[in-house]
Image (tube, grey):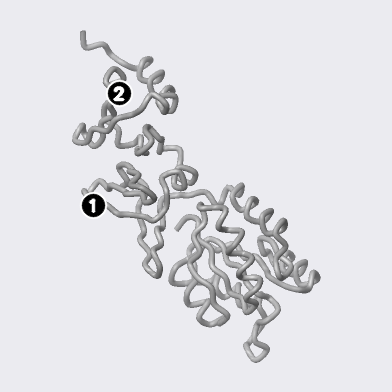
Amino acid sequence: MGGSYYIINSDDATSKNLCERFKEFPEFICLGITDDYENGMNFILKYSPKVVFIDVDSYPKDNIGDIFSYCKEINEYVFSRPKYIALSKDISKGYLALKSKFYDYILKPGNELEVRKVILQLLKSEQYCLNDTLCLKSYKDYTLLKVEEILFLKADNNTTDFVMIDGKTISAFKTLKAFERILPNSFIRIHHSYIINKKHMSRINFGKLKCFLDHNRISLPFSRSYRHNLQSIEELLEQRAISSQ
């Protein structure tokens, strides 16, 4: 799932600061917060968050090993290792986390600037890019969508409808603009209300400002204000086109 993070932390102030900063970045989805390490491990193995913020100060002393062996144990069972970001009041523990191949560390309770730097670094990270699956969260419900099976997205006030190749429509409680920022390059915005998957485009009529998808089964308008997004496609088609006249 792309854009997901999870917090294992007993300090409410730090967790609140993290969540407040992430509100500025709709690319990220918070999967949850816990202060229980056992439950945290079970959740990570079940839902595979991309990023895990983990309190390295409060790991139970009666547990076998330390926080770093805890993370190594998780890595033994997941297909894709999460990026661990240590949370600590002690900078020496932050350095130790980096030596243990953590992605980064944040000193509690989470300075606004430092948290924002970490988030922006995550966005720049190549490994963080959306691959083949998009996760939509609604309260405790998670819907996984295969990117290649998305035909187009349609704006509906402050929600977005995902129309799939099997005819199903899945609604998400985010704006079209929020998804425009995180979708891969195969998606382009053609209208105030539409983003299409270029891989399913079968015809374009530039005269009538129409895009056709799914073997011409679906017709969508594109507006002049977004015509520049189709410019490169038009140039490519012009080069390769065989005239039927």
Q: Position of residue 13 (x, y in %)?
A: 65, 73
> Which secondary structure lies at badge 2?
loop
Residues 66 and 36: in front is 36
Disc 1 marks which residue?
Answer: 168
What amino acid is at disc 1? Lys
Q: Residue 68: x, y in percent? A: 66, 74
Q: Quadrant of residue 242?
A: top left
- Which is nearer the eye, 42 or 189? 189
Whether the residues at callouts 2 and 1 have beta carbons within 8 Å, the answer is: no
Q: Using residue 227 as the reference point, say whether residue 216 is left or right of it.
A: left
Marker disc for residue 209: 2
Tell me if 206 is positioned left or right of 225 in this view. left
- Sort mark 1 into few (<14), some (14-19) or many (20+) by Cα contacts within 10 Å: few
Amino acid type of the residue tagged 2 in the rendering = Leu
Q: Quadrant of residue 214?
A: top left
Q: Is residue 114 left or right of residue 6?
A: right
Residue 23 place in picture, x, y as percent:
55, 57
Task: Name the quarter where the C terminus is drawn.
Answer: top left
C-alpha span from label 2 to label 1: 26 Å
The tag on residue 136 is none
